[in-house]
């Protein structure tokens, strides 16, 4: 993944989140069936979103909690959703943080 500027990361976050925001919470909270050994992550749209955007956040060398607390908090929520996309609280928190990010940018 490439290094982005702060503004590029913010715009990417807003755009990517807008694509999934109107999906029903039940859809977002549905993880893939990994009972078969040949099944590969990610399967569902929510897993793909979390995987893609979290990978991008994790590769930004400049992103630090003390200098970018809101982006760091978004990264933390994404990390929780990466472990379990079935957390409706996690999705609600993510959308709240992205709204805050939009209002501040």
Image: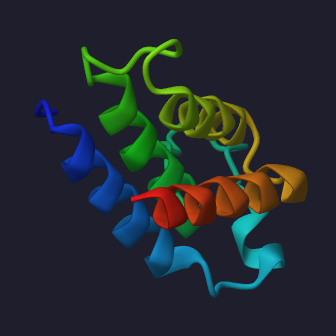
Q: Quadrant of the C terminus?
A: bottom left
Find the residue positioned furthest to the front.
Answer: 104
Closer to the camera in the image, 62 or 49? 62
- Left/right of residue 37 with respect to residue 18 in the rendered view: right
User: Could you tell me residue 89's position as x and y percent?
Assistant: 88, 53
- Left/right of residue 88 with respect to residue 58 in the rendered view: right
User: Which of the 4 quarters of the picture holds residue 14?
Assistant: bottom left
User: Which of the 4 quarters of the picture holds residue 58?
Assistant: top left
Task: Residue at 71% x, 68% y: name it.
Answer: 28
- Left/right of residue 81 with respect to residue 39 in the rendered view: right
User: Could you tell me residue 35's position as x and y percent?
Assistant: 73, 43
Task: Residue at 63% x, 29% y: name it.
Answer: 76
Task: Residue at 64% x, 43% y: name it.
Answer: 36
Q: Please, which colouring scheme is shown?
A: rainbow
Vertical placement of residue 59 versus 49, above or below: above
User: Which of the 4 quarters of the picture holds residue 98?
Assistant: bottom right
Task: Residue at 16% x, 38% y: name it.
Answer: 5
Residue 32 is at least partly visible in this image: no
Closer to the camera in the image, 6 or 1? 6
Vertical placement of residue 70 versus 102, above or below: above
Vertical placement of residue 16 versus 36, above or below: below
User: Could you tell me residue 9's position as x and y percent?
Assistant: 28, 47
Residue 104 is at least partly visible in this image: yes
Q: Quadrant of the N terminus?
A: top left
Q: How many marks?
A: 0
């Amino acid at each position: 993944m490439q290094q982005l500027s702060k503004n590029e990361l913010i715009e990417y976050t807003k755009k990517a989140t807008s694509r999934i925001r109107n999906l029903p919470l039940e859809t977002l909270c549905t993880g893939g069936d990994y009972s078969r050994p040949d099944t590969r992550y990610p399967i569902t749209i929510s897993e793909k979103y979390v995987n893609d955007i979290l990978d991008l956040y994790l590769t930004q060398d400049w992103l630090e909690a003390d200098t970018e607390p809101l982006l760091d908090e978004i990264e933390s929520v994404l990390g929780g959703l990466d472990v379990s996309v079935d957390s409706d609280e996690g999705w609600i928190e993510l959308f709240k943080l992205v709204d805050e990010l939009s209002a501040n940018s």
